[in-house]
Amino acid sequence: MCGRTFTEYPPFAVAHKRYALAQLAPRALRYVEDDSISYRKGVLQSYLPVFHWPLDGVTESWSDDTRALAHSTLYRWVSALGAPSYAIPEGLINRSDGAFAPADWKFTTDERRDTLLACWRCCSLLGLLTNHAPL
């Protein structure tokens, strides 16, 4: 009656993302934890790009319609999982490897460092809850 719409997503879905949480979290955690992984390396699997074909005309051969997962997508995933809407309290994640700190070259501002830390906390907790193996 008020003219508003409310959407409730299932636990595996992330609002405004094409991928489910099971695909976002392991890649984002791998990027944040591994000092040698860049955004461009983070979207590779077994040193090959992750390819996607258009839904309306899936073919067996590669064509101009073939799309690979872009490195900017991983940047947005890390940003989304490090956003305040996914904020996890600092004391909730206790890892035996001590305090986590992202590599210095992965951020230039304190805000981005905080986003990387928040993403790490979120993905670590999701990994513990779902017991997913890393990529």
Image: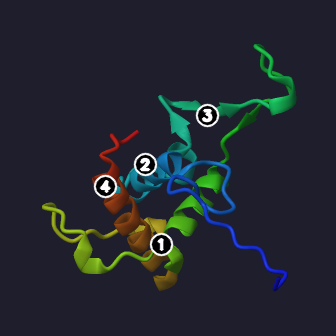
Disc 1 designates what residue? 86
Q: Which dot, 2 or 4, sits closer to the camera?
A: 4
- Which label was assigned to residue 77? none
Marked residue nearer the N-terminal end (2 or 4):
2
Q: Note whether 41 is above or below 39 in the view shown.
A: above
Q: Residue at x 61, y 34 (%)?
A: 50
- How far is mark 4 from mark 1, CA to CA? 15 Å
Query: Residue 59, how many percent across, how many down?
Result: 80, 17
Residue in the foreground of this view, choosing between 69 and 57: 57
Residue in the foreground of this view, choosing between 124 and 108: 124
Disc 2 designates what residue? 26
Q: Residue at x 57, y 49 (%)?
A: 20
Q: Which dot, 3 or 2, sits closer to the camera?
A: 2
**Mark 2 secondary-structure assignment:** helix
- Which label was assigned to residue 50? 3
Q: Is residue 108 visible?
A: no
